[in-house]
Amino acid sequence: MGRGRGPRGDAKGDRRPHRVLAVADARHPGGDLLGADRRRHQAAAADDPGRPRDLEQAGADRRAQSLVRVGTGAAHAAAGGRAPAQAALHHPGEGSAADLHHLRHQGGDAAGGLPALPGEWPARAFQDARHADPAAAARHQEPVRGQLSPLPESAVRRARRAVSVTFAAHGTLFGTWATLIPLVKERLRLEPGVLGLALICGAVGGVIAMQLAPRLMRGLGAPLLQRAAMLLGCVMLPMAVLAGGAWQLGGALLLMGAGIGTVDLVMNAQAVQVETRMQRPVMSGLHGLWSLGALSGAGIGALLLTLLPPPWQAFVLAGSAFAAVFLVSRTQLPMQEGERSNADARPRLLLQPVLILTGALMGLAFGVEGALLDWSAIFLREYHHVPKAAAGLGYAAFAGATLSGRLCGDWLRSRLGDRTVLACVGFAGVCLGAAVLSPVTWLTVLGFALTGLALCNAAPILFNVAGRIGADLGSAGSTRAVGGVTTLAYAGVMAMPPLLGLVAQHSSLTVALGLVACMAVVLGASAFMLPARLASGS
């Protein structure tokens, strides 16, 4: 049945142009596509009341017109000719409403007598157009594979500033927690094995949250999800300090890990997109800001412990980190769906051997960093008998050297290549082994610093490699690839505390950290297993 028409041929209650009504109909094979396009932009206008609706309407109509032009142009080019009314659609601005009306009600065309329904575009015309030029139809129906929509340079610069602040705030939470671990251990009188099981809860929370984060990001948007996750992590940090037992500590760390793990995924996905748009290495510098935040958290945290009780120290630093992220999260880049970011493509992406290898190497890198975060202060406290306020200096030295190396990392990557820089991570194992065997406190601290200098660029390089693996699926594919690698990385962090805790309980902490040094050597030796096209240091 035809639709009712007003005096100008429009549908009743609908003032859209003829050319849009000709196709945007649910009964037409292309109508679902155009109707979905209009509904998507109407939903966007409802979410943003300040955006003029007439602009949304005009944008949707222009996209519909372009699809009509592709369909008619391809169909009649295949037929070897074009009627005046069809030419009017193929060339916008030509022809008249009478031509369009004639085209709607004609009984056939040059393509072979296509039937027409009253008031509708002929059904086969759109289908034949897609068969005549499937590439052109695909370009207008789906985003181009691996291509990001253009954005102003100012928007990319604002996004880089936002992700830089997020990296620094995220690192501040880790540095603050590093200064508090020895105090929590002593107050609760935890054995190394029990402490290791409690610390693993943070990684478990992160792994669980990362499985839900992509769906939540599509539903809530990256800015809102990041703010909510950061708030959760910042609230749980003082709660962990106030825990009355191992079970309460584990529960607080589980929720804190879920919050900061989600922030970790979002900010690294944003960093990959920023580096892709800027077309030069920036990932190492962003991770350098994470190290700056960790160094600030450890240093300022140690200073505040001389002035404030531990819960208030955690509250002040965590509150500052959340305020910083809340203020900048609105300027993030939009996360776009790629051409093949569907349910069938995601399992194939996550099962790629090169992505699994990248995730395994990331697990080793995170495991080594996590070991020094969790155990360096305890090692200095128990083996070198340093004061409580000075126990965090070992991790502070590690974070400071990591910061210096990452600030130079983009320059090194552009000249030496990612695989060469990653191979230097093996030197971290030598430095860490020397640090744990040294009886002199300052040499041990120096060894921790050199370990950070050698290890610093492993995580930025591997995150960038993961983003390149998923780049064929657009920014959504990069997000999922980064999420898969981060999950494996957190699995390494998750396995490290109980492993080191059990080794330390049955032998010594020196042996446990020696095992970590061997892992760093394996990480450096495995660098050349990555394909050159992915680890080229662009």
Image (cartoon, helix red, strand yellow):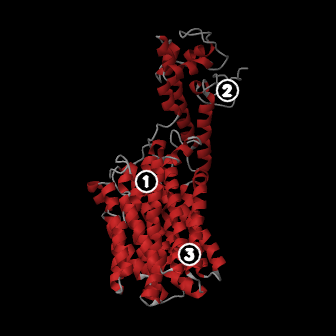
Instruction: Residue at the far right: name it.
Output: 1
| Residue 196 - label | 3
Crowd tier of the residue under label 2, counting other residues whose Cα lies within 10 Å: few below 14, some 14–19, many 20 or above: some
Q: Position of residue 132 (x, y in %)?
A: 50, 19
Q: Is residue 313 left or right of residue 436?
A: right
Residue indicated by mark 1: 272
**Which is more foreground, mark 1 or mark 2?**
1
Q: Position of residue 319 (x, y in %)?
A: 53, 74
Q: Return the disc, 3 or 2, that comes first in the chain's sequence.
A: 2
Q: Position of residue 442 (x, y in %)?
A: 34, 85
230 vs 114: above or below: below
438 vs 482: above or below: below
Q: Callout 2, which amino acid?
A: Ala
Residue indicated by mark 2: 11
In three-dimensional space, the C-alpha distance between marks 3 and 2, rounded to whole angstroms, equals: 68 Å
Identify the element where label 3 is drawn: helix
Q: Callout 3, which amino acid?
A: Gly
